[in-house]
Amino acid sequence: MKVKPNNESCFDLLLTFTTQVSHHDPATGDGSNTLTFNRQTQLVKREVSAYSLAQERMTAFCQANPVPAGLQPVFEQTTFQEFAASALVRLLLDMYNSLEGTGVFSGMDRYEKLESRVRSAATRSFTLRGFWARLCHALRLPIHAGDDDVVLMTFYGLPRGLQQDMLSLIVREYRSVVTLARAWHTISKTANDYYANAIGSEVQSLVIMSFDATQIGSKALDIVPLEVPAVSANSLRHQVVREPAWYHLVGALELSSVLPGVEALFSNGGNIKKGVKAPSNAADLARIIRGAYPPLDLFGGCCDNFDLGEGRLSVAGWVVCRENAESIAGTPAEFLPLAGVSIFDMLDEVTHTRQATEAGLGQMIWNFETLATGLNILVRLSLHPFTSDISRSALFAAVEQFRRQPTIAGQAARGFGWCRADWFGNDEHDVTEYETYLVENREKLVAGIENGKLGTTTPIFI
């Protein structure tokens, strides 16, 4: 088969969500009471004005947060952001860490609860105000004393960029931050003569730390890592094209029985069995199979004992928002209204309840983050230049199948992730060639799937 290169290799699809989007982070198994939205670290440009801090303000902040002399060598090795992040968590301990604790922050495992909720609150926040509110809510803490407002304002008044630095630090190093805060809180008690004598400890003096404000952001533009909510390209590839391509093939061929390995190959890529040896003609078999079944040419996959090779389709996706402005520049999504809106303003938190039976069994309450209704995601489908016309047509057939019942990410059964899917640009996405091929070769294609040979003379699946 000869294939000539085709210059038309990128196709853009715009998803507009008619319900909220739920896409939990699979790494959030930390015992916190809220499942966070999936996030990916990306580098974001930030103006110097967003994080510059005058020396006098930095000095005043340090004076408001003196440290025990015993911890001075530790904090001399930290950055100002690390110092300030530890100070904020220490403040919470000063307010609420009584003998029995308060709210959820109580009992022998209080610090374990604190750790998980500190990280979760920082992950979901864009400012220290939001972090404090989410953390206090997650720990079910009562309102603090009025005298503490003044101290909190010194944190809220820090430049927005520094606040984001502190939150990113807490997400990455939450255990170290909590450890420093706990030591600071505990040792500071011994600065009180009465308390130190009561526990038989040496009285600690408090010292004022000193940091150099000129070391924070000396460039006109600073690039910082930021944990940005994102719908993974892996989910988009599976839900927009791969799974719909399989559903379309099943319907077009009217399949009634499929071997499990064949279904896995088409639906999720399959797996090579442990300990098997690839046949000597694996490359020839792969070429025949990919030629007979165009979806496998697009996605590739694994048979029981060999790999079909890399698929010809690449998928990328970006939430249309301010944080992704550079990524979507030059695309049709660049001038959409949401391109200037921060994705952190699109986050919401949802609480769901599973009702109990009449006997009182099975009730469950859970919280999770979502992205708002009306959200846009730009999906770019890119084909290898030497992709055949029939494989290209199979791609369009898969997307049209998806558009009949378009859902993305999780919890579609509960009404999340429903969207409209519209092509950007060229309106001609011809599915005729592929669908005609399926009709004309139905008997052969069905036989290949049912007998596990996939168009070859060799049993590929047993």
Image: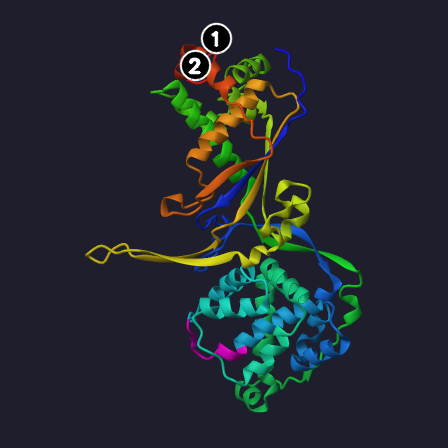
Q: Residue at x 61, y 70 (%)?
A: 86
For marks 1 and 2, the one nearer the N-term is: 2
Judge from the rendering whether residue 74 lies leftward or rightward of residue 184; answer left or right. Answer: right
Using the image, determine if residue 382 lies above or below residue 360. above
Q: Is residue 291 magenta?
A: no
- Amino acid type of the residue that numbered disc 1 sits on in the rendered structure: Thr
* Residue bearing the label numbered 2: 439
Q: Residue at x 76, y 74 (%)?
A: 54
**Can you give x and y, in whole percent of width and height, for residue 344 in the image?**
56, 58
Residue 457's disc number: 1
Asked which quadrant contains residue 425, the reply is top right
Of the two numbered discs 1 and 2 in the rendering, the one whose residue sits closer to the viewer = 2
- Amino acid type of the residue that numbered disc 2 sits on in the rendered structure: Val
**Can you give x and y, in whole percent of width and height, for residue 282 in the image?**
57, 15
Q: Are marks 1 and 2 in contact (CB under 8 Å)?
A: no
> Can residue 453 be spotted in the picture?
yes
Q: Residue at x 54, y 19 (%)?
A: 277
Query: Which span is picked out in magenta?
Result: 94-103
Residue, far left: 358
Scheme of colours in the image: rainbow
**Can you give x and y, in whole percent of width and height, for residue 444 in the image?**
43, 10
> Can residue 307 be spotted in the picture?
no
The quarter of the picture where the N terminus appears is: top right
